[in-house]
Amino acid sequence: MMNSNSRLDTKDLQRVFLRSFTLEWSWNYERMGSMGFAYAMAPIINKLYSKKEDKVKALQRHLEFFNTTPHVSTLIMGVATALEEKNSSEENFDAKTISNIKISLMGPLAGLGDSIFWGTIRIIATGVGTSLALQGNILGPILFLLIFNIPHVILRYYLMMEGYKVGTQLLGDFEKKGIMDSITYGAAVLGLTIVGAMTADMVYINTGVTFGVGEFSSTLQSVLDGIMPKLLPLGATFGIYALLRKNVPVLYILLGITVIGILGSYFGILVP
């Protein structure tokens, strides 16, 4: 059921649900699913905000980096919808809360969603569909699509509705207990922690530079690892962050990384 004081109705949430299927249609390496997320939130933003500048700020807020398993993304959309509704009706509401909570939910949901859909349901659907397809049975591809998509669509719709409901209820409880600022701060810290962990786990830079002769030779990589493991990935991350702070276009940064990677590999400076 919708909150009696809500400015939104079930049809509004259903619009977001339907638009959520476009999450990966405009996927890109700069902000990944941000354009799809903003597109899904557009009907809500248009209804909640009357001033153009408020609509612009809301759309810019949802054009920030976003990436999670698309099948469970509606939970975040539902929560974001509840937060936008609160932001539109209260002058003292901190809009940064919306971004912080989105960031804090992306990582955990991605891990859960990937394991359920990519690691389990897809395998089951592929097994059933392939076994029938190899026998020349037309039900093979049909069952593959049904087994994978029926639970996906049902869960996607359910999470949208529950995300909004939970978001609304939690906001009310947080405000009564006066812990909204603590939640916002905690969400921001969690989000930054996830980003830091991703840097150590997903950025790979190794150097093949050696110095010394014979048995006395050593590698620069071993020296750097002795100082601090993953020192090169950390330095590269901070370097890219500095470039972004100076408003260097992301396309130029990606081209630079590509050129450095090719030349570094060719001359043996960088190794797999």
Image (tube, rainbow, N blue to C red):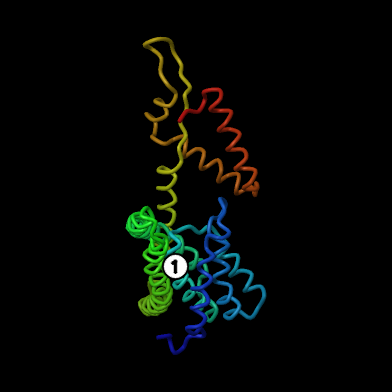
Would residue 132 be found to the left or right of residue 88 on screen?
left
Task: From the top left corner, tell me how far across and down residue 133 is, in percent.
Answer: 39, 56
- As drawn, 229 above or below 269: below
Task: From the top left corner, tell me how far across and down residue 157 is, in percent.
Answer: 42, 74
Task: From the top left corner, tell me how far across and down residue 4 is, in percent.
Answer: 44, 90
Would residue 226 be found to the left or right of residue 263 on screen?
left
- As drawn, 209 above or below 12: above
User: Foreground residue, 243 or 65?
Assistant: 65
Residue at (33, 55) in percent of width and height: 131
Which image quadrant: the N terminus? bottom left
Amino acid at circle 1: Ile
Query: Can see residue 105?
Result: no
Task: From the top left corner, tell me how far across and down residue 115 is, in percent.
Answer: 34, 56
Residue at (62, 40) in percent of width and height: 255
Would residue 122 be found to the left or right of residue 36 on screen?
left
User: Foreground residue, 137 or 154?
Assistant: 137
User: Foreground residue, 33 or 108?
Assistant: 33
In the picture of the structure, the residue carrying the numbered disc 1 is 76
Q: Counting other residues with Cα less than 10 Å from the Cα at mark 1, is it few (<14), some (14-19), or many (20 or more)?
A: many
Residue at (47, 76) in percent of width and height: 82
Residue at (49, 74) in percent of width and height: 81
Which image quadrant: the C terminus? top left
- As drawn, 109 above or below 198: below
- Secondary structure under tag 1 reads helix
Outermost right residue: 52
User: Foreground residue, 241 or 167?
Assistant: 167
Task: State which quadrant residue 26 falls in.
Answer: bottom right
